[in-house]
Amino acid sequence: MNNRIKMLIVDDEKITLRNLMHAMKKEGYEITGTNSGANALKHLDEQEFDIVLTDVRMEKVDGMQILKRCRQLYPDAEVIMMTGYATLQTAIGAIKLGAYDYIAKPFKLDEVRKVIKEAIEKIRLKKENAQLREQIGKYEGKVKIVTKDSNMQRILDTARQIAPTDCNVLVSGESGTGKELFARYIHFNSRRAEGPFFAINCGAFTEELLSNELFGHEKGAFTGAIGEKKGLMEMASEGTLFLDEITEMPSSMQVKLLRVIQEKELLRIGAIKPVKVDVRFIAATNRDVQDAIKGNNFRQDLYFRLNVISLHVPPLSERKDDIPLLSYYFLKKYAALMQKGINEISQEVIAVLMNYDFPGNVRELENIIERGVALSNGNIMEVGHLPEDLKELSIRTFRKKEGKIPSLEEQEISYIRWVMKEIGGNRTAAAEILGIDRVSLWRKLKKFGMEPE
């Protein structure tokens, strides 16, 4: 970001000005300097700066006037004040007017560099937040999958391609990854978008209740059937029916479902005349379907009928770059629902979330952000709004990848890569954390073909 940072330095002491300009140019910033407060105002009128580093006490136009003009013209710029008259009153006045920080003369260049880098980080965060809010605005009023992950984008491309067709779809993935959202996305991008969309969890009902919910019944079909009832399959005609946790469906129900898919008709409970239906089926499961077939818990012929197109939704731990984007999406959603003015998430919160593996996936992240919005009173979600265990723990879970349990070597590679990334590629520090010597680490890196990150 340094190459894009434009800085205005203002100081009526020419030696101080020259030294500061020289030091900041070496840091890679684009520098404009002046020893006149009046000239500084002209520069501000002519172009925008990211950072303004200004002396407070100057003749005619002082640093406080420069601060006020900068705040008027460029609200997102950061102003750092310098003075040889370091009084508390002056500092409080500058901060109240919006100064980022206050440096007392004489100062060390390292001190100035540190404050400027912190100001740049704040600017970067504000720009990132603005970009995230802009991206979130695109999702309003739409069934949209919030992601910038390349793998998720490929899955979305497939979903868009098959949406206009009537082929059945099987969506797999861990609980909380958004399988139903994908089903809705496919439905609302299909020719059936004007038709109904219904969803049912096949593992949430007894066999009798599930049969009644899906197929409906005739009047008098059983005790308490005082009237005719249409089932979800019939109600979803010309639309889409989402069957969640399909592998939990009882075997007898699987046979009936297979007939509906093949014949495009169903029998209500207690009926003798079939009813024609036109339904697109999208099924989902968090289990390994092949394991369910081998265990005789799921029919292979039904699997073939449902698995015309298969989509696998990866866990949130495999698309970490989506965490900030999703966090802001949920922040905006719950801020509106709770009528709160919160619109930002602190960098500390993002850091904690990025270091967490989310065994509950997107659903867990949504719950965390909802809780944070509920607890906040200001406009920024802070670390104090996070659950206590999340602040204290970094949970890393063991997950199947492509249906396989990872080997010990795969876990070792993953852990070494993570450690190397966390400590910035420092081999000595990594070896100490791993409990091995530096030579042993070097051998492992060479063996696994890994480059330090």
Image: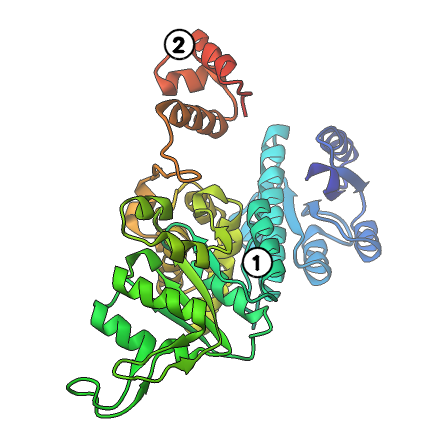
Q: Is residue 94 above or below residue 34?
A: below
Q: Nearer the viewer, residue 90 or 416?
A: 416
Residue 159 is marked as 1
Give the image location of residue 45, x and y in percent: 82, 58
Q: Are marks 1 and 2 in contact (CB under 8 Å)?
A: no
Q: Nearer the viewer, residue 80 or 340?
A: 340
Q: Quadrant of residue 20?
A: top right
Give the image location of residue 239, x and y in percent: 50, 76
Q: Is 161 placed left or right of 277 in the picture?
A: right
Q: Residue at x 60, y 49 (%)?
A: 154
Question: Residue placed farthest to the left in the image?
Answer: 223
What type is the residue that disc 1 sits on?
Answer: Ala
Give the image location of residue 179, x and y in percent: 44, 58
Q: Quadrant of residue 116?
A: top right
What type is the residue that disc 2 sits on?
Answer: Asp
Q: Residue at x 76, y 29 (%)?
A: 22
Q: Residue at x 35, y 59 (%)?
A: 246
Can the viewer see residue 104?
no
Location of the C terminus by quadrant is top right
